[in-house]
Amino acid sequence: MKKHLVIKNIISKELCEFLTNYLLFKKETYDVLQQTKYISPFCELHGKTGDSQIPGSYCIYGDVAMDSLLPKVMPVIEKKLKLKLVPTYSYARIYKNGDELKIHTDRDSCSVSATLNLGGDPWPIFLKENKKTYKVNLNPGDVLLYDGCKYEHWREKFKEQMCAQVFLHYNEKGSKNIYDRRPRLGLPVDIKTK
């Protein structure tokens, strides 16, 4: 990818609302499962509280509903970028007040990163591309496409209450890294192909 691109309304407002509610419900379910010790604190099948980038906020890797978005929106992304792609993984997060995403680049599964706003309060994302900084505001259903491995990106401190996002990642066709080295979409990160 040579430069970033925003696609408006890649998914409908109704689907955004459904997926935002789904994530909030999933987080509440996860919280109860943790509080009642029904699942181990090491089990991430229902998500987890925080990661190295955003400690304390609910996130989930490879959720079946979120991974289902990868092939759904891929034809639109391929057409806009004039590239053939393979899906790698999804990662969803519910940001909360005070969260801040430090400047970073992504790992090798993210040569085409798609940041999709699902709902909640607005929160711009910044990216540095060819020494120029861009501030991008996304409405629910809008997606920002960029080379996550190449371009630094970040978010300033969140002053609102809640923002639901899903990150859809792809590599160019021919890459050996399909499904983030899982046998298929919808599986946890620690299930790898041999």
Image (spheres, helix red, strand yellow):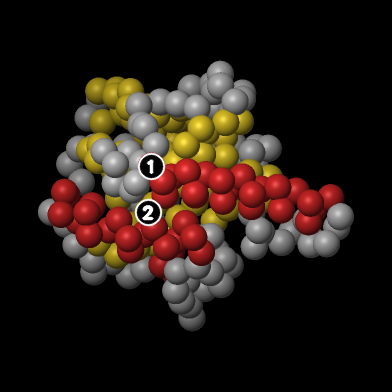
Identify the secondary structure beneath mark 2. Answer: strand
The image quarter containing residue 179 is: bottom left
Question: Percent position (x, y) of residue 161?
Answer: 59, 25
93 and 176: which one is in front?
93
Residue at 56% in and 72% down: 191
Q: Residues within 10 Å of mark 1 (few under 14, many from 20)?
A: some
Q: Where is mark 1, residue-wise?
A: 13
> For the residue labelled by badge 1, is the local secondary structure a helix, a strand or a loop?
helix
Of the numbered discs 1 and 2, the one sitting upstream in the chain is: 1
Residue 80 on image: x %, y %: 16, 49
Q: Which residue is mark 2?
A: 169
Pinpoint residue 173: horizontal percent, then vertical percent.
23, 66
Residue at the front extreme of this rendering: 14
Q: Amino acid at mark 2?
A: His
**1 or 2: mark nearer the eye:** 1
**Mark 2, other Cα within 10 Å: few <14 / some 14–19 / many ≥20:** many
In front of the other: 127 or 117: 117
Q: Disc 1 to disc 2, how far (Cα)?
A: 21 Å
> Which of the two residues, 29 or 136, is positioned nearer the viewer here?
29
Q: Residue at position x 27%, y 58% from top?
A: 74
Q: Eyeballing the image, is 165 above or below 131? A: below
